[in-house]
Amino acid sequence: MGTPRTFAGLPVVGIIEIGDAAVARRALVHGATNNTGWSDRPPALFRVALVTGPRRRRSDNINSAPHGPLWRALRRNLTAHAIHPARLASLAPLRRGEAVVVRECLFGAVFSLAACMCFGDVDDAQVRAMARLVHDFVLLMGGSSSVSGTGHWAKFKLLDKLLQWRLPRQLGDPSTLRRRQAELFLPLIDARRQSSSSARTCKDRVRPYIDSLIDLRVPNDHDDEDNGSKSKVAVGLGRRALTDDEMVSLVSEFLGADRGGLRRVDARPPRRVAHPEIQNTLRRELISNDNRPPPGRGGGMPYLHAVVLESLRMHPPVPFAMRHVQARHLHELLAQDDLRATPVRVHFVLGDIGRDPKAWAAPGEFRPERFLPGGEAEGVGPLPGPNNREIRMMPFGAGPRYCPGMGLAMLHVKCFLSALVREFRWAPPSSSSSSAAVVDLTELDGMFKVMKTPLRARVTPHVH
Ligand code: HEM
């Protein structure tokens, strides 16, 4: 049984935090698959419509779409087209980047790849503009020092403010950010719309996500709105194309999703700086696999797989999996009658689950070996399946709404980590005497987790 904290003080958004793996499993894996109300997220934060008129809709993306036919169609499109494993092989040449040091360089390398997967061939200036936008979004969501050190309470307050459109001035305003998204993305979307489907396919090395969105037809639903009244246009009439609003939200989600993911990449170099023996073991494994294809699911490189899992266990980049539930489902789950506020939002705290001292030996220590054969976590993967008797970690969530980008994210992390360790030796800067002095793994409180003090390291190329 979990010990949820209630935040009855929050008048608008009642939030329950759950950090107990058994409760998470009952809700997310069993509750959701048995259709007991655990498959919805709260509505989108940025519900600012860009388009007016009779075809105005909610601007949902996959994250925010209610569990139902629209969500299913959007999610299937992403997994079947943009990030299907068979298509990822064609990206190998793009992935051979010169990724060198820490967060921003790494971010640049992964972000150009994500932009290319999303829009096809885009120039450097466009990639930079997209990166700036995503960066501002992360800031807005609390990945900045402006909310550091203030704990969960501040984060919830920030979310609360966002929901009520009362943002602190220095963070900007969601409608401005949404307009900037539209100004940048709509011309690119329109340009793709103008060219025929066959011309688009020939021009790019990979078919970008945006093309699949242009061609996609989703089921009509009930939420076409025109000045607040239900429109009769769409209800029950087959399928429709996506609106500009939805396109912008989906593209932003794709680019932002990768940002959240690759932010986690930055926790790995410091771990290696702090642990030269881990660095050496990893490099030996990489060298002995030199002529093999890029790292996939870990088969050929168990230690690399273990290092990535251990990083995700200790520092899940996304702090919580959110659900929007009716109070009665929560009462059933927790068998508790004394929940004062009517909760509408539940946060499963992923870090608490991965670092639970009841489930892990020395949970605060970085020990990749636990995932190797004979270790306490042999067989534990990044996603708890329905057949797992317990959840040990869930950095990509769990149940029907688990992260569909998991395969791509694991591949990216492994590719960049291998390149960084294969090519460079990582050490503390010469001015510091010990790695502990420079590696501050404190995380900032925000929607995405980042290290409080960005890594400084002495990086020497290995001589081949
Ligand atoms: C290390 C990288 C990443 C991490 C740790 C991560 C983590 C997560 C988590 C925790 C969730 C919520 C799951 C739940 O509520 O049960 C999620 C959802 C999602 N992620 Fe990721 N993610 C990563 C990368 C990506 C990438 C690369 C993409 C796409 C290209 C992506 C797309 C999504 C989408 C669309 C959802 C919403 C799924 C739905 O509601 O059905 N993520 N992710």
Image (cartoon, rainbow, N blue to C red):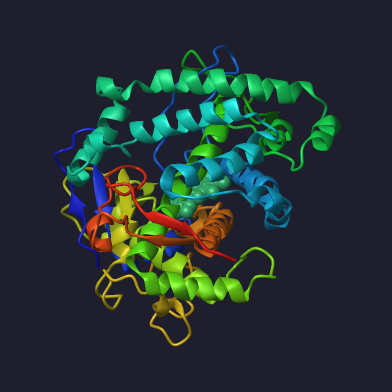
- How many circles with numbers are drawn on the protein? 0
Residue 10 versus residue 170 in the image, above or below: below
Q: Residue at x 60, y 46 (%)?
A: 75
**Quarter of the C terminus within the rendering:** bottom right
Q: Position of residue 197 (x, y in %)?
A: 82, 31
Residue 292 lies in quadrant: bottom right
Q: Is residue 74 visible?
A: yes
Q: Position of residue 311 (x, y in %)?
A: 39, 63
Residue 276 lies in quadrant: bottom left
Residue 380 versus residue 382 in the image, above or below: below
Q: Position of residue 15 (x, y in %)?
A: 25, 45
**Quarter of the N terminus within the rendering:** bottom left
The answer to which of 162 and 35 lies nearer the viewer is: 162
Q: Position of residue 214 (x, y in %)?
A: 71, 31
Left or right relative to 32: residue 127: right
Q: Residue at x 77, y 20 (%)?
A: 194
The answer to which of 330 and 426 lies nearer the viewer is: 426
Q: Is residue 23 visible?
A: no
Residue 146 versus residue 427 in the image, above or below: above
Q: Residue at x 28, y 47 (%)?
A: 453
